[in-house]
Image (cartoon, rainbow, N blue to C red):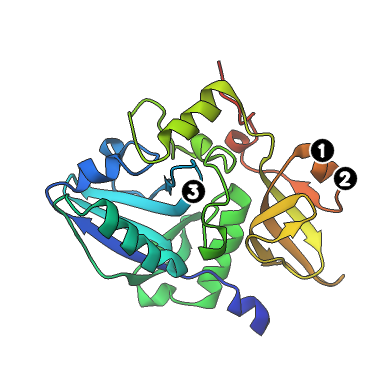
Amino acid sequence: MTQSSLSTLPQFVQLTIQGEDAEKFLQGQLTSDVTKLGLSYQATALSNLKGRIDFGLWIKKQDEKHFDVVLSADCAEAFQAHLKKFGAFSKFDTSAPVPIYPCVLDEVPTFSHKEEHHTPADTQAWTQASLAIGNYWIVADTRGEFQPQELRLHQRGGMDYDKGCYLGQEVIARIYFKAAPKAFLHYVSGTGDAPAAGDKLEKIQVVNAIADDDINGKGFKALVVARPEHLVDSELTVLDLPPALQADVARQK
């Protein structure tokens, strides 16, 4: 693994949200139904009023007063400011962010506090596995760039269209029930240097990428948001996502 590859590996932190109003507050913020969460990390999102994702999160529920939230380390300060602003009149406390380490356990990308998983190899394995299954992560440079449906979050259990109001819900619901994104998440490979999150390859926007060099030279794999016709016209190779994420992103009537 090259030094440049090491420098681009993602870093994550966990915050704990605890208190009498924790569940009620998060229910009014997140795209998923917080009451249905369990002890496994669930991908979810916290959107802005324009219906675009400000924070890509993984969340698990210890009980209705205790939630653990994981996000990209470079978004932690902004997330804390958001909680302070919107939760000013709610009864809960937020812990300081602590490092948590991405790794693959039982072939599933997850997170661990164990120092034994604090290795570049673990993070590399998590990144590669996450790209292959559409497990995107939002970083500081991609905050406010994507709508949840564009990233197929509804196909991963991270959206609930029946739970009631939450931040950005009006715009998100309108897109889901009355329209459909023309550009959406794809898994691709390409040649050359790996692009950065948020980069645009002409009309194709990068969500996440990792270097994937081989004996033939430099290459990369990436999650991108694009119209299918723009991918056809590009030099990228479209790879298969899991079957659930190859379905039409439009609402199934």
Residue 186, horizontal then vertical, whole percent: 68, 45
User: Which circle marks residue 233 in the picture?
Assistant: 2
Residue type at tag 1: Glu
Q: Residues within 10 Å of mark 3 (few under 14, many from 20)?
A: many
Q: Is residue 179 left or right of residue 102?
A: right
Residue 19, horizontal then vertical, whole percent: 14, 53
- Residue carrying label 3: 53
How far apart are the two marked residues, 1 and 3, measured between alpha carbons?
25 Å
Say how many tags the image has: 3
- 75 or 62: nearer the eye? 75
Residue 134, horizontal then vertical, whole percent: 58, 48
User: Which circle marks residue 229 in the picture?
Assistant: 1
Q: Residues within 10 Å of mark 2 (few under 14, many from 20)?
A: few
- At 37% across and 25% down in the image, what residue appears? 162
- Dividing the image into 4 quarters, which one contains the N terminus? bottom right
Residue type at tag 3: Ile
* Quarter occupied by residue 49: top left
Q: Is residue 187 above or below residue 6?
A: above
User: Which circle marks residue 81 in the picture?
Assistant: none
- At 68% across and 51% down in the image, what residue appears? 224
Q: Is residue 163 above or below residue 9?
A: above
Give SS at disc 1.
Answer: helix
Q: Name the N-terminal-most of marks 3 and 2.
A: 3
Q: Name the N-terminal-most of marks 1 and 3.
A: 3
Whether residues under marks 2 and 1 lie with C-beta atoms below 8 angstroms apart, the answer is: yes
Q: Is residue 117 left or right of residue 152?
A: left
